[in-house]
Structures are given as structure tokens and as C-alpha cells.
Amino acid sequence: MQYRRFGRLDWQVSALGFGCMRLPTVGGDRAYIDEPLATRMLYYAIDHGVNYIDTAYPYHGGNSERFLGKVLKGAYRDRVRLATKLPCWLITERGDFDRYFNEQLERLQSDHVDYYLLHSLNASSWRRVRDLGVLEWAEAARQSGRIRHLGFSFHDRLEVFKEIVDAHDAWDLCQIQYNYMDVDNQAGTEGLRYASGRGLAVVVMEPLLGGRLAQPPAVVQAVWDGAPRKRSAVQWALQWLWDQPEVSVVLSGMSAMEHVVENVACAERSGVGTLTAEELALVDRARAAYLGLRPIPCTGCEYCLPCPNGLRIPGLLDMLNSVALYGDLEGARRRYEHVPEGERAGACQECRQCEDLCPQQIPISEWMARIHKVFGEGQPLEEVLSGR
Ligand SMILES: NC(=O)c1ccc[n+]([C@@H]2O[C@H](COP(=O)([O-])OP(=O)(O)OC[C@H]3O[C@@H](n4cnc5c(N)ncnc54)[C@H](OP(=O)(O)O)[C@@H]3O)[C@@H](O)[C@H]2O)c1
Ligand code: SF4
Ligand code: SF4
């Protein structure tokens, strides 16, 4: 295994970390972990040098933490550092901090957590837990030794990321969604460098976009096939991350033993600056090939906002683009259902105010109608796209 700097902490982290959100399950029930197989996978990773394990309160309906509590008892516990997270979206009052944390310690069969992260922060959840005193609570827990190090995981825009990084001197780590397709999305490359430059360890999640980069479409596979040095799509994605000095550890949510074996072997060959200039250019070409599949040329600049009707225009456009790039129409339909009804594409009043502001001259109101047909009314994507 290769080891890397973990921010300002005097500790070397394995290049690969084990994300315990996608453990193998049985019977199609996410809450029912295939414990014998998951145990073999976890022990294989630890026996091959993985020393960072990531879980969270909701993973596998709470059973990810319970599983780790069981299997990390004894010698394996001392060989790893364990991260778990406060479910910020469930916090409504100060007493909730202790309530969830104590429940987590009980599940983990432990008296402390090595890395405790405020889970999935965005602008509103951050401000809510901050105003409820989460930093003061965490500082007290740190002083008492129940939390060793404090961090946060993040899903929002770069400006919000910087605001959170700057809000607290004592963050030791942050966790961001980052991969070669997300260089300008959420924290992105700028956020990675910003946090690292301030001494935070940066833990990368979704290195394969939740697995979507593992099975590339033909145009992207053609780019990989053209490489002088052969690597799988997964290996290209992972090595691109490890090439960057600001990345501390790459979490992979491995769901099969073959994933663990491949990703451990890949991590063993990893290092900062291992990709050549030609190979980095090849990754740029793979990204361009993916982006070429987008039906809507939205850059996410947000000049079109605010929409007077409250529609989050770039997010809605991205939903359709993502399906064209990576598939998973059903997943996108489920996400669309979670958008409040008044903010769905179907609520567009066709005022076209946004269109005057869009530098890409995207006919946004027409796309809103199509997006609603696909996600809200269940019409086939191809039919709606070809009706352009
Ligand atoms: N804090 C947060 O808000 C948050 C959010 C997301 C994730 N996380 C954490 O970050 C971890 C990593 O994120 P992620 O699970 O999304 O990682 P990911 O690596 O982007 O996706 C994992 C999926 O990639 C596929 N995969 C992995 N290795 C592979 C291989 N060698 N060959 C082929 N396919 C492979 C598998 O897909 P299939 O199962 O489909 O085969 C696996 O389930 C999570 O497990 C979790 O611990 C945290
Ligand atoms: S056209 Fe639709 S999306 Fe654009 S500003 Fe008007 S209501 Fe919002
Ligand atoms: S202004 Fe145009 S390109 Fe920019 S986010 Fe809005 S729709 Fe996308």
C-alpha cells in the first residue's frame, strides 16, 4: 500500500479508504448486509494496508455502523482509523448532538470516534447546526477524548465550501465529491486546493461517481482504448485522483470482492505525479467525450438565477444531462420526485426571463417542458429528445 499525508496531522493514511455505504447485501434489501462477504472484503483491504474506514449514521439503515462495531472488535480496530458522521439533517435541537453521537458509539461498540464529520453539509444545514452550537459541542467532545478529530462532508457550491472551511480553525479534515467529471462541480479542484492549502486533509468520495464511471459509453471507452498504456476505466479514474498531491485518501464504496482486489492493487501502484502529461491529456479527452453526450450545453454558470418561480434551473438541466451521460433514468426520476412540486420543471411559467440572461442561449423554457415530460410524466427519454 502507498501512504499519504493526512493534512496537518502527524499520520499517514492509506491511498485507498474503504467506504461502507455500498457493502454487499442480500435479498435486494439495502439494510441487510451480506456480513460474511463484507467481512472478508474488509479484512482483505486491512490486511493489504488500508487504514481508513468511512461510515455514517444512515448507511445500510444504520447497519453499516453496527456491522463495523462487530467486525472491528479486537486486533483489526487498532489497525485502522474509523470515520463516521453526524446526520445533520436530523438535528433539530442541541440535545440531538449527544443523542445521535451516543447511539453511534453504542453501534460502533466504542468509546470514541477517530474522525467525526458533520454529514453532507450544504448552506442551510451548515447554518442550522452552527447556530445550534455544533462547534462548541464538538470541541467539548474533543476535549473529553470522545472525538479525536473533527471534519465535515460536503455537497453544495464552492462559495459555501469556502465559507465552511473558513468558519472554524479546528477542522482537521473535509470530505468532498471529486472525480475527473466533477472538477468544476461542488467543491471541485478549486475547493480541493483551498482546503488542502489551509491544512485540512481532503478525503475524496464518489471517485467513480458512485460507479457510473466504471462502465463508460463507447465514445469514452474508445479514448481509454487509445491509450498507449492500458488501464481499466476504474484505474484511470483512481490514478487521476492519486496523481494530485492535495488528495489525502480516496474512498471507494466497494460492493464486491473483485472491486477490493482491483482497487487495492491499483492503490499499490499509485503516487503523486505518476501520470504523464499525455496521460493527463487523455483524461481531459475522456471528460470531453462524456460532455459531448450532453443534449443541453449548460455550463452551470447560474447567470439565469434567480428564476422568479424558484426553479433551480441548472440543477434541473443537469438532471437530464446526467441521464444522457451516465444512464440511471429511474434514479433521476426518484430524485425529481424529491424536488418540491412548485420547484419542478413543470412549474415553469415560460416567462423566458432566464433565456435573456443565458450566455449559451439555451431555450430553457422549452427544456423545462421536456424535462417534466421525462421525469414528471414518465415519457421515454429518446422520444422526448427526438421531438426537439
Ligand atoms: N458524506 C457523504 O455525503 C457521502 C456521499 C457519498 C459517499 N460517501 C462515502 O464515500 C464512499 C465512496 O463513495 P462511493 O461509494 O460513491 O464511491 P464510488 O467509487 O464512486 O462508487 C462505488 C461503486 O463503484 C463501483 N466500483 C468500485 N470499484 C469498482 C471496480 N474496481 N470495478 C468496477 N466497479 C467498481 C461499484 O458499483 P456497483 O456496486 O454498481 O458495481 C461501487 O458500488 C462511500 O462508500 C461512502 O462511504 C459519503
Ligand atoms: S422561463 Fe421558466 S425557468 Fe425561466 S425564469 Fe421563467 S419560470 Fe423560471
Ligand atoms: S445561464 Fe445558461 S448556461 Fe448558465 S446555468 Fe443557466 S442555463 Fe446553464
Image (cartoon, helix red, strand yellow):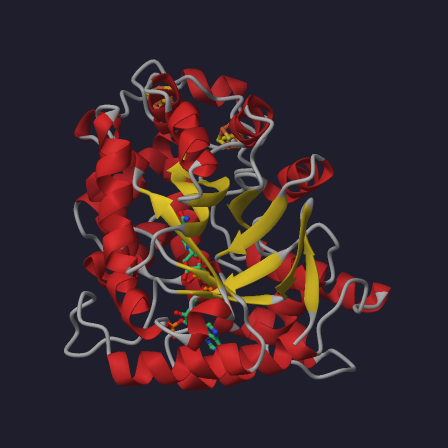
Residue in the picture at 66% in, 44% down: 189
Looking at the image, which is closer to me, 105 or 27? 105
The reply to whether residue 183 is in sight is: no
372 with respect to 40 (left or right): left
Above or below, comparing residue 366 to residue 201 in the picture:
above
Spot the residue most to the front.
144
The reply to whether residue 204 is in sight is: yes
Above or below, comparing residue 120 to residue 264 in the picture:
above
**Which corner quadrant of the image does residue 222 belong to?**
bottom right
Above or below, comparing residue 286 to residue 351 in the picture:
below
Spot the residue most to the right.
277
Looking at the image, which is closer to me, 187 or 364? 187
Above or below, comparing residue 240 to residue 7 in the picture:
below
The spot of residue 382 in percent (x, y) is 33, 59
Residue in the picture at 33% in, 22% down: 128
The spot of residue 132 in percent (x, y) is 32, 20
362 with respect to 332 (left or right): right
Residue in the picture at 26% in, 24% down: 94
Residue in the picture at 24% in, 63% down: 66
Looking at the image, which is closer to me, 212 or 47? 47
The spot of residue 109 in percent (x, y) is 28, 60
Q: Quadrant of the N terminus?
A: bottom right
The spot of residue 161 in percent (x, y) is 54, 31
How many labels sit on residues?
Answer: 0
